[in-house]
């Protein structure tokens, strides 16, 4: 039973980040920077939780997610601006900013945000009021999970049932036709998708710090932002599919440890498997496309 | 006569349940220009892909220079001296002309001098000269087409296949190309020319073969043919007569009305171009309601910029007044890249540019699409079919139907029939005509096919060097308009 909750807990950031990746990818924005945007959100959550003396859960629930999302969006704003202003490929800039975020976290937990004893490279535990209550007592499954499911449904509704979503899909599928025949402001839509994607990733960072780890430290994310790309691709960029694929990857990663303990299969096999899934998905995508043409 | 340069006999090719070729024959003599005609889907391209080694036939024999061969890849076809110029460009835009010509040769090094020498040699032999160091992507369309041909000729070619090489060319460029082809044929190369334009067939071909539904409908000396007979072979007797009658009726109607009210009034319009030179340099003209105005121009004389400025896609200065609803609809030339989103459904493509509010109701879009499909005679499985699977003609009808669904008072169209076959072209012309006569729209279009401008337009204007000049009724001949396009006073 605890294993199931571990899987759900693991699936939560993957679900949120999968949604983030999907929103960008559907608009033709190759945001590989969910990892960095996630960390930006986590940093803000840890900073607010440890340094602001939050005592009211209501304030925490309003302020922390909002500012973490803003931080994620800000982290995405840099590559978004570079892309629209100079045409710099966002694939490169977002990956590079992931490293910046990783080392920024390293600096913070050795410096300004280090715990009071100055012994361990991590922050103080965040204030009790800033912590997300567990959905099931004694587990680290929080309200972030149902929120993620709701968010996935909302993303589906917006993408499939609103003109904004239509514009997003049009820009992603053929920006030239979107501009010429659809009179869609391609730049603005792309920029918007990029920022929303960053904001959702930032939210995931806050959910992790406030719901699971209660502190900031190095290696907070075991590559959630990259796995999320596999999550989104396995769902074939369908928002509802992401719920299923995030669960699948959650089970896979949560089970990696027992795999090693019980069956003697190295846990890294799971990550190799994830890589193979991405490759297989890309191939299948290509094949079906060619068959349709 | 010596052995055929290439001979295809009884070629059968199936794609799943569709039989693209049902025993087609084609014989190419050295030194002849052989025109290959047929509607879209008649099997022209499939047959040429078989000869070019891109497809292997299910049945049939291929002989090259008298010996039976099996062509398993384009490389093998190339080795046998079969060269193919595809309809869609295949050069690398960011590479120079010389680099593009060298591409695909064995070896790791790019030998600049040798490559430049090859381009020069082909230029001298055929008259198809090119600037070796120019970037391919920056060449005008006519020269890009030329590059594609030079690329193929840079190898030892005995059979040259050209798939609609004149689709993007001006009359002058077509004349140059044909002169070069004559030259090549005289040196013993067999040339296959795939085309939709009957005038070209009669102008240059020695022999002509017409395919209909995967089989040869007519084959013989070009001199013995007339446009009527070729059209009949292409689409079947009865249908040809109908199309002809319709065309005649339309040109008769065209003379009737000259709407009094203005659909478009342009004064001193200036549109910037690449660099410091303006593409459109202060033009003024009017288009009346119910009037079709056609622009004839050589590529790069400001016609595209003018149309796009009127469509509101590029900034301009000067005064533009659109009458009636003030709505301008635009039909872009490249339906696949600018006109449609190929992975979207028919209903979604029809919704492009026609959406209001926030809620999107797919079933509404589909209902609307079904109505439009019926009205515009778009053949598809249904409103949810992905547009990629539609034929070129149906795709173009879709783009046109969407433009008209916006209830414009002015329709602006770029090369509205580019790459379409006879029947689809006739359909599009009829739609444009009806839009003008029945719905009172002003229609302003540009076509790189001078014959189309002459056939379709009520009034013709020529653009040269960014200036506008009306063509008087007495000047309405191919020769005179051609001269004006080149800047004659």
Image: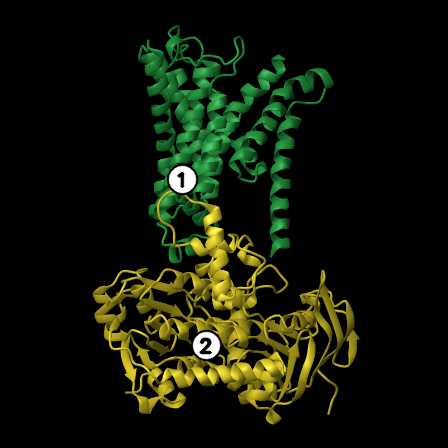
Q: Nearer the viewer, residue B157 or B264?
A: B264
- Which residue was labeled with disc 2? B169
Where residue B100 sits: x, y (%)?
52, 66
Q: Chain of mark 1?
A: A
Residue linked to disc 1: A193
- Residue B387 screen position, x and y as percent: 53, 57
User: Which residue is more in the foreground, A123 or B348?
Assistant: B348
Quarter-wise, where is residue B196 in the image? bottom right
Which chain is mark 2 on?
A: B
The C terminus of chain A lies in which quarter of the figure?
Answer: bottom right
Q: Residue A206: where, in percent of width, then height?
A: 42, 21
Q: Quadrant of residue B63?
A: bottom right
Which of these two is toward me, B68 or B435?
B435
Q: Is residue B17 above or below residue A235?
A: below
Q: Quadrant of the N terminus of chain A?
A: top right
| Residue at x-position 65% and y-position 32% | A273
Q: Quick one: which chain is yellow? A: B
Q: Residue at x 45, y 10 (%)?
A: A120
Instruction: Specify whether B1 is left or right of B35.
Output: right
Q: Is residue B217 left or right of residue B331?
A: right
Distance from the alpha carbon under mark 2 to that under mark 1 = 41 Å
For chain A, what colour was chosen?
Answer: green
């Amino acid at each position: 039973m605890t294993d199931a909750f571990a899987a759900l807990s693991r699936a939560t950031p993957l679900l949120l980040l999968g949604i983030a990746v999907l929103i960008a990818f559907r608009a033709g924005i190759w945001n590989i920077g969910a990892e960095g945007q996630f960390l930006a959100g986590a940093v803000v959550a840890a900073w607010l939780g440890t340094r602001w003396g939050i005592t009211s859960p209501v304030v925490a629930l309003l302020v922390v997610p909002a500012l973490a999302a803003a931080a994620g969006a800000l982290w995405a704003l840099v590559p978004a601006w570079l892309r629209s202003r100079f045409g710099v490929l966002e694939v490169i800039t977002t990956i590079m900013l992931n490293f910046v975020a990783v080392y920024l976290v390293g600096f913070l937990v050795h410096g300004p945000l280090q715990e009071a004893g100055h012994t361990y490279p991590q922050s103080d535990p965040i204030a009790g009021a800033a912590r997300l209550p567990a959905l099931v007592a004694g587990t680290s499954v929080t309200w972030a999970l149902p929120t993620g499911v709701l968010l996935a449904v909302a993303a589906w509704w917006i993408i499939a049932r609103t003109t904004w979503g239509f514009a997003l899909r049009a820009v992603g599928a053929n920006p030239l036709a979107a501009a010429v025949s659809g009179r869609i402001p391609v730049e603005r839509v792309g920029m918007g998708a990029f920022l929303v994607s960053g904001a959702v990733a930032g939210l995931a960072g806050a959910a992790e710090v406030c719901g699971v780890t209660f502190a900031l430290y190095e290696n907070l994310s075991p590559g959630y932002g990259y796995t999320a790309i596999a999550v989104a691709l396995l769902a074939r960029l369908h928002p509802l599919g992401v719920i299923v694929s995030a669960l699948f990857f959650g089970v896979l990663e949560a089970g990696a440890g027992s795999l090693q303990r019980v069956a003697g299969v190295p846990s890294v096999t799971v990550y190799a498997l994830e890589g193979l899934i991405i490759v297989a998905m890309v191939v299948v995508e290509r094949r079906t496309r060619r068959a349709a043409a | 006569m010596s052995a055929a340069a290439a001979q295809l006999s009884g070629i059968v090719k199936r794609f799943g349940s569709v039989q693209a070729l049902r025993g087609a024959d084609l014989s190419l003599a050295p030194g002849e220009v052989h025109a290959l005609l047929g509607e879209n889907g008649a099997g022209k391209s499939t047959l040429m892909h078989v000869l070019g080694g891109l497809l292997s036939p299910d049945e049939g024999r291929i002989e090259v220079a008298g010996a039976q061969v099996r062509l398993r890849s384009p490389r093998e076809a190339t080795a046998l001296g079969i060269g193919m110029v595809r309809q869609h460009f295949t050069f690398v835009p960011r590479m120079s002309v010389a680099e593009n010509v060298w591409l695909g040769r064995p070896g790791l090094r790019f030998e600049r001098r040798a490559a430049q020498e090859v381009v020069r040699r082909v230029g001298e032999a055929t008259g198809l000269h090119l600037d070796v160091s120019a970037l391919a992507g920056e060449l005008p369309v006519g020269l890009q087409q030329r590059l594609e041909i030079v690329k193929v000729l840079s190898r030892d070619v005995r059979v040259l296949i050209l798939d609609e090489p004149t689709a993007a060319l001006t009359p002058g460029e077509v004349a140059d190309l044909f002169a070069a082809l004559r030259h090549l044929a005289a040196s013993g190369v067999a040339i296959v020319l795939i085309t939709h334009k009957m005038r070209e067939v009669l102008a240059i071909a020695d022999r002509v073969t017409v395919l209909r539904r995967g089989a040869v409908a007519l084959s013989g000396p070009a001199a013995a043919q007339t446009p009527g007979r070729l059209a009949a072979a292409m689409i079947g007797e009865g249908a040809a007569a109908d199309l002809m009658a319709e065309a005649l009726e339309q040109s008769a109607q065209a003379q009737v009305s000259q709407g009094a009210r203005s659909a478009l009034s342009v004064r001193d319009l200036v549109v910037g171009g690449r660099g410091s030179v303006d593409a459109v340099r202060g033009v003024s003209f009017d288009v009346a309601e119910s009037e079709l105005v056609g622009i004839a121009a050589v590529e790069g004389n400001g016609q595209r910029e003018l149309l796009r400025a009127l469509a509101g896609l590029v900034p301009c200065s000067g005064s533009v007044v659109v009458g009636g609803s003030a709505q301008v609809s635009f039909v872009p030339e490249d339906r696949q890249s600018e006109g449609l989103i190929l992975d979207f459904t028919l209903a979604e493509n029809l919704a492009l540019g026609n959406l209001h509010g926030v809620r999107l109701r797919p079933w509404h879009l589909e209902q609307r699409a079904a109505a439009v499909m019926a009205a515009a005679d778009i053949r598809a499985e249904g409103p949810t079919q992905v547009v990629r699977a539609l034929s070129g003609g149906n795709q173009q009808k879709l783009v046109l139907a969407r433009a008209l669904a916006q209830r414009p008072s002015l329709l602006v169209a770029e090369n509205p029939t580019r790459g379409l076959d006879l029947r689809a072209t006739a359909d599009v012309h009829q739609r444009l005509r009806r839009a003008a006569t029945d719905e009172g729209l002003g229609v302003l279009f540009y076509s790189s096919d001078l014959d189309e401008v002459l056939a379709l337009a009520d009034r013709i204007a020529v653009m040269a060097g960014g200036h506008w000049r009306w063509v008087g009724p007495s000047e309405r001949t191919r020769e005179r308009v051609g001269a004006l396009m080149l800047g004659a006073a």
